[in-house]
Image: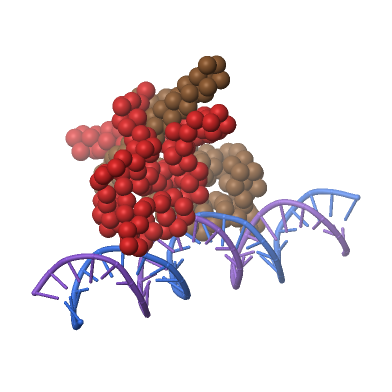
Chain colours: A red, B brown, C blue, D purple
DNA sequence: CAGCTACTTGACGTAAAGGTCAACTGGATG
DNA sequence: CATCCAGTTGACCTTTACGTCAAGTAGCTG
């Protein structure tokens, strides 16, 4: 059904759990240029509670985990979520490591809801794709007839 | 690949072509309540050139074609498009009936681009779905173990 | 240490997507 | 005919998601 490998998804989620010692880190400009956003945007996301990088002498230092969160943010934004929605959404990734029963129940329920929502979007997307492909093919057909009658 | 029937896509696209005589029509409040938006929103879309209903004594009258366009707008919005993008997008549906070669070429190219873009979004969506399913299953597993040790 | 660069916070500006409110109008209805 | 009711335009307000600019700072670098 999905083209995404199980391993890929697992390791991405894993990057939200234990921050390893001596990991690779990034400055704000690194992330900004890598993902084609401005530093201002990254700071803005932090001000909204979506990111919380370490600080060294005032400056922001981003690790793998922060980077993964930024990827999530941009992905969700591209799919039409507001930053407020994304904040709730990110919690699901961050807290999947905790073990208390109430927490687990919460995460299971919320991921279930989120999955349904995304499946709905997927149907809409497929519908639109089907229509565009129809138009594309139809016009291509007419174009062939018009050019080589 | 897609769950959307070819016929479904065809007939939806067809509703953008010849407006039939004596078709069913809707008032602004009908559409608003059907799609859970306010009349203000519908007027706003019109002011942006996304809709152009007929007028009867000042009041707006929407036909099947207008209704189909509204569906397209809301679908595209849910997938993260801006109204400006949607305006270009809608042109592809509206003009697929014209036959001049330049027009056909334009539509074929633009639909091609749009299809690629949506396929990209679909990959992002699938990626996110895979991750959420992973979290969902993991937490469900832990929950079972925690409850029935 | 002077100067440069990259970073910081803070204040203010702005475009998009509507919401809100006021004043008006066209029809239906008692 | 008065009176609703739904609809209309226009002006202004609000929220979201940043951009812009000013003033300050930490850390190299000649």
Q: Residue at 47% x, 55% y: name it.
A: A48
Left or right of A144 in this view: A113: right
Place residue A106 in its image quadrant. top right
Asked which quadrant contains residue A21, the reply is top left
Image height of B73 relative to A13, above or below: below
Look at the image and tell me in which quarter the N terminus of chain B lies. top left
Q: Nearer the viewer, residue A31 or C20?
A: A31
Which of A132/B129 is in front?
A: B129
Image coordinates of residue A134 in percent, x first then y, are 36, 33
Residue A23 in the image: state x and y as whole percent. 27, 44
Q: Is residue A148 left or right of residue B85?
A: left
Question: Which residue is the extreme one toward the top?
Answer: B148
Residue B89 located left or right of residue B56: left
- The residue shown at (44%, 50%) is A50
Depicted B72 relative to depicted B145: above or below: below
| Residue B57 appears in the rendering | yes
Q: Residue at x 65, y 47 (%)?
A: B29
Tell me how many marks there are.
0
Query: Horizontal and vertical percent for residue A65?
Result: 35, 43
User: Residue A56 placed where, x, y %?
Assistant: 32, 58
Foreground pick, B53 / C27: B53
- Residue at 52% from the left image edge and 16% from the top image edge: B149
Can residue B100 be spotted in the picture? no
């Amino acid at each position: 059904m999905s083209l995404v490998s199980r391993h890929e998804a697992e390791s991405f989620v894993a990057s939200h759990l234990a921050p390893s010692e001596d990991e690779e880190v990034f400055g704000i400009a690194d992330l900004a240029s890598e993902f084609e956003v401005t530093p201002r945007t990254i700071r803005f996301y932090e001000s909204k509670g979506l990111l919380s990088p370490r600080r060294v002498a005032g400056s922001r230092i981003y690790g793998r985990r922060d980077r993964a969160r930024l990827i999530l943010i941009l992905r969700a934004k591209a799919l039409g979520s507001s930053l407020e929605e994304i904040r709730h959404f990110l919690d699901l990734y961050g807290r999947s490591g905790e073990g208390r029963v109430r927490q687990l129940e919460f995460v299971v329920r919320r991921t279930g809801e989120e999955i349904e929502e995304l499946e709905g979007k997927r149907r809409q997307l497929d519908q639109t794709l089907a229509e565009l492909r129809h138009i594309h093919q139809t016009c291509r057909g007419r174009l062939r007839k018009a050019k080589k009658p």
